[in-house]
Amino acid sequence: MSADTFPRQYARTRRLSLGEPRSATITANGSRLTFLRSRGGSDPVTCLWAIDVDTNTNTLSAERLVADPLIIDAIDATSDHELPAAELARRERMREQADGITAYALDSTGEQAVFTLSGRLYIVATSPSAAPPRPLAAVDGAFDPRLSPNAKSVAYIADGRLRITPADASPNERLLIGENNSDDITWGVADFIAAEELNRFRGYWWSPDSTTVAVARVDNSPVDQWWIADPANPDRPPVPHRYPAAGTANADVSLWLVRAEDGQRTQVAWDAKSHPYLVAVSWSHQGLVMVVMDRAQRHQQTMTVDLDGTTATVVDEVDNAWVELVPGTPVLFGAGCLVSAIDTNDTHALATQETPLGPPTTMTPAHLQVRRLVDVDNQRAVLTVNASGPVAGLTIPVDPACVAVLWWPLDKQAPIVVAGGIDDPGMHDAAALGDIVVVRSASVHRLRADHRILRVIDGQVRELGTIPNLSESALVDPRPVFLRAGPRQLPVAVLLPSTPVPDGHTWPVLMDPYGGPHAQRVVASRNAFATSQWLADQGFVVVVVDGRGTPGLGPVFEREVLGDLATPVLEDQIIGLHCAAEAFPQMDLSRVAIRGWSFGGYLAALAVLRRPDVFHAAVAGAPVTDWRLYDTAYTERYLGDPTVQPDVYERSSLLSDAPNLTRPMMLIHGLADDNVVSAHTLRLSSALLAAGRPHEVLPLTGVTHMTPQEVVAENLLLLQVDFLSRTLNL
């Protein structure tokens, strides 16, 4: 066998993600946690594991295997089925790259877990010495199962309908809702826009008393039908795909309360015509809360919902650009207190208020950008944050590249830095319940992320142990140098080749951005720069810039892309490039290339089309070339309605720039991509051909937006370097 290389390793390990723990869940009494992980860094089969926590002695049991797909497959021959189409769609929306058990759900005590394998439904006890997983009565094609809190029933989706089955494996499985369904109507499934753009991947929610299920009904019939073809296999019919492109109709989404006992249903009343987006639904012992938003995303309403379907607005938020969504919010707790996200003083903050319609009280200070509400109860909130400026009393880095985990007492005591303090800068995330916090910590100096189990007692953070991370460490040694560029202090990272060179030697430059709204590339995490370092080691100085629109520097910075997704982001790449060149004179600015995927692919093509004086070659992967072909919620958030503002779309489109191409450009696109469809690349290529502009196109047969296939992922890196070497005369 040939020696392992980084491109091969990166593909084989699914971007170094295999073998790392994820989806940690803490049980109600804090005595157990469950998580997913494969057995090693090149093992794609994810298993369910558990660890017991002794809160009297603050000790942990050894981890134990709760459910292994390979053993289940060996025992249950009926599990050898293709994945349901809805499950494949869920994985694509969540960018899921592993196999095996990719999701699971617990009852309220954490004693039972349910999951699906190849469309079959299973239940397993999480306690020590429990019996192996057993199948439950369910129709084929099951996915997204959820145990009722009392552990007596399991709801699941099959064929776009919500079904229910007893958790004791008795045969009384039945349809709960979805009779007389058409192919265009689903019950309990998140619609495309919710899952792709609004961070809502679920479509149904059990009430805490297990009597009622809140269910989203999605009617896709108003949405234009597109077709995803497989040109390499002309004998296969195209696959229909309802795609809500900017300016066209969305799915009709409604919310229903369904009684679990007999399926009796009540529709939740809200003005869906003016506020069509169902953004979030959460159900606590204090009641049901839902969030809806208008299509322009400038008006958001948080509502409480009664069992008779009536609603009452408790938060009414308006923003002239768009209302920002903070994951984990809003949530009801205690005696009807609501925690929600608000923007104030150029800060994404949390606020509390007594319902109904009491005045909100800002909970977090200026410059503390709340990234996610992890958990909240009567005593404290656990949240992830970054500081965009000095925050009194908090010793965390003032750096958008560093995210910390805070324990925020609700009795006005000082917050506690659980992870990510000034002595441990990095990207920290968490799961929390009660006084137990499971923290994932990645940094530039860690070979792989740590997963620590912590307990916060009397204001002190105590480490109980770790969850072993079995992922491989990269075969490169990323060494990013962080800079801040220009008056806006843009985050910049520079990576030099590892090979020492004589004084006076210069290197060509490769810009390696994403650059789009709501996504960061400049983060204090080693693996985030693994590919960039490998590219640097091929003979480049690699520069990564986060420009306007990216998170961490506050709402004003993020909203500077409103109405123009081209000019600000391109200007900021150039500002970052020149800042890096001042710090590293070995950069050869006469040979500057740019590569990217998705929005980064759009930015790469934009760079050579509009600024060939700066950029000399581009690799554009899955680029959005015409924003009229991208989805409603994302595109209209930034550019508005194309039927009202066509000039805004024209300014951000690449098609009219095709005659301006004077630099080498490679276009790469997966032909099975249902997010940025391949028409984007094909239309740009057609416009370039019509203008007589030479370019290269690399179509990827059977590849989606994720490019998960091992051979494809490995060779894509090699082919990009070959193209850049040819065009920049390395």
Image: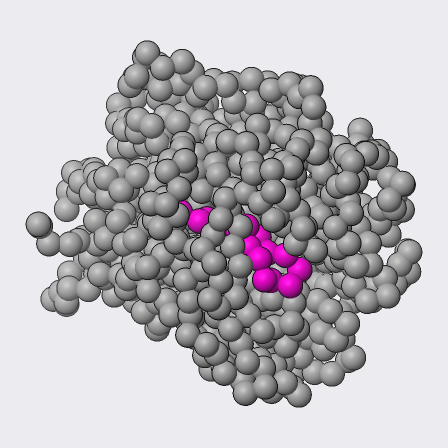
Q: Residue at x 36, y 56 (%)?
A: 38
Residue 174 position, x and y percent, is 66, 33
Query: With respect to residue 213, does 182 lie above or below?
Result: above
Residue 489 position, x and y percent, is 51, 62
- Residue closest to the far left: 1
- Residue closest to the far front: 170
- 237 left or right of 2 in image: right
Query: With respect to residue 2, does 456 lie above or below?
Result: below
Q: Residue at x 82, y 59 (%)?
A: 286
Residue 599 position, x and y percent, is 46, 40
Q: Which colour style is shown?
A: one colour
- Magenta residue check for 106: yes
Q: Looking at the image, which is closer to me, 386 or 207?
A: 207
Q: Residue at x 65, y 67 (%)?
A: 28
Report whether residue 325 is seen.
no
- 190 left or right of 445 in image: right
Q: Looking at the image, which is closer to me, 577 or 629?
A: 629
What segment carries the magenta color?
98-114
Residue 235 position, x and y percent, is 32, 11
Q: Looking at the image, which is closer to me, 203 or 319?
A: 203
Report whether residue 235 is seen.
yes
- 183 left or right of 528 in image: right
How many discs mark residues in the rendered view? 0
- Magenta residue check for 509: no
- 725 left or right of 237 in image: left
